[in-house]
Amino acid sequence: MPRDYYEVLSVPRDADEATIKKSFRRLARELHPDVNAHDPQAEEKFKEAAEAYEVLSDTERRQTYDAYGHEGLKGGGYQPNFQDFGSISDLFSAFFGSGGFDTAFGGTRMRGGAVQGGDVALAVQISLQDAARGAEVEVTYDATALCETCHGNGAEPGTPIVTCDKCRGAGQIQAVQRTRFGQMVRTALCDKCGGDGKIAEQPCHTCDGRGMVARERRVKVDIPAGIADGQRMRITGRGHAGERGGPPGDLYVVVRVREDERFLRDREDLITVVDVAAPLAALGTTIQVPTLDGEVPLEVPAGTQPGETIVMAGRGMPPVGRGRTGDLKVVVNVVIPRRLSKKQKDLMEKLAESMTEDNLRENEGMIAKLKRALAG
Ligand SMILES: [Zn+2]
Ligand SMILES: [Zn+2]
């Protein structure tokens, strides 16, 4: 049984069209393939949201669904067909048009006909080192900008802008549909003038009358030290340009921190594993340990056991914002020598013969040592 459509979009049952649209756009943004390449479930979740939106954004389908549920829709001949798409990118394109994701977020109508520009989402990859120190990364992407030839009005300079003949200046057209519930009149935005009610007699040659052109943008993004994999940064006003005086959209940058084979990251702490030969672990030794600042010497005390952890304070990741810098935890992997030579074998045998209970006992605390001294 499919999930309840209202639940999928997290909207109340009496939500108006704008609320439903807003919620779907938020979901779509979260599930965008550029942002979710690592999440195999994103595609299914998007399909589910798209289906819910397709039903709830359509007055007729919504009425059917409210009255008769999923079964009613099926009975009415509605068949969601999101399962046939090859990839989530194709699906986005199918749903939002060839502009895909970006146009999907370009349509926030504001007062006075102004339209806020759409958001742009992209991902950047940085190394763990850069995540520790912070980095400035330059990103390049295409975003729409006002056409400089026509200053956004879509008309070839010096030519008039006339009333749209399709909608006669109304900006919207009405279409009559025959449905199971009788005739329904739907009002739609005029596709010829895009809702302006006016069109250029001669479209601008630079932008084909759209008033907007795609332009490459380069933006330097300051990634703060300590950033975690998957964290998202919002750069205000660096998205697509607004229309009719509307503000531009935002740029969202998802930061992916590449895995470093030397370290495991546990919030602010780093964990690394180093091999130490058993005789050296028994005798005590100094080893070289990888840190974010290169290799540093570390003393391994005599009698260090397999798996023991030595903490190097402050050698981990810095916190984002307040907090303390993490530690580097060095796990000592005591390696038992293999493939012994004749001489080594002799030495090992001698060592083995000389072993006493005391060699196997854990280090005693101060009190236990004193007691033994006093008793002896
Ligand atoms: Zn133009
Ligand atoms: Zn029109």
Image (cartoon, rainbow, N blue to C red):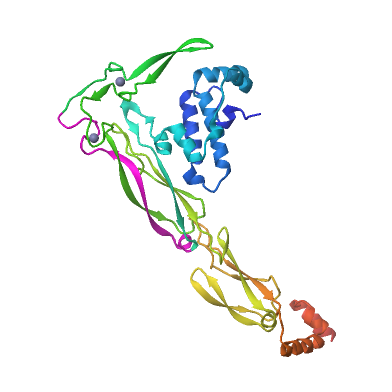
Along the line of sight, which residue is nearer the eye, 361 or 371? 361
Can you say whether 353 is above or below 161 in the image? below
Q: Quadrant of the N terminus?
A: top right
Q: Residue furthest right?
A: 375
Residue beneath the point at 49% across and 72% down: 294
> Taking 339 as reference, is 45 left or right?
left
The percent position of residue 272, horizontal first and vertical second, equals 59, 68
The verdict on residue 134 being magenta is yes
Instruction: State which quadrant residue 299 falls in.
Output: bottom right
> Taking 1 as reference, is 5 left or right?
left
The percent position of residue 358, horizontal first and vertical second, equals 80, 82
Along the line of sight, which residue is nearer the eye, 263 or 303? 263
Can you say whether 44 is above or below 167 in the image? below
Total numbered circles: 0
The verdict on residue 364 being magenta is no
Q: Residue furthest top?
A: 182
Residue beneath the point at 40% across and 38% down: 102
Can you say whether 134 is above or below 252 in the image? below
Q: Which quadrant does ligand 2 occupy? A: top left
Extent of the magenta region = 129-158
Residue beneath the point at 51% across and 51% down: 230
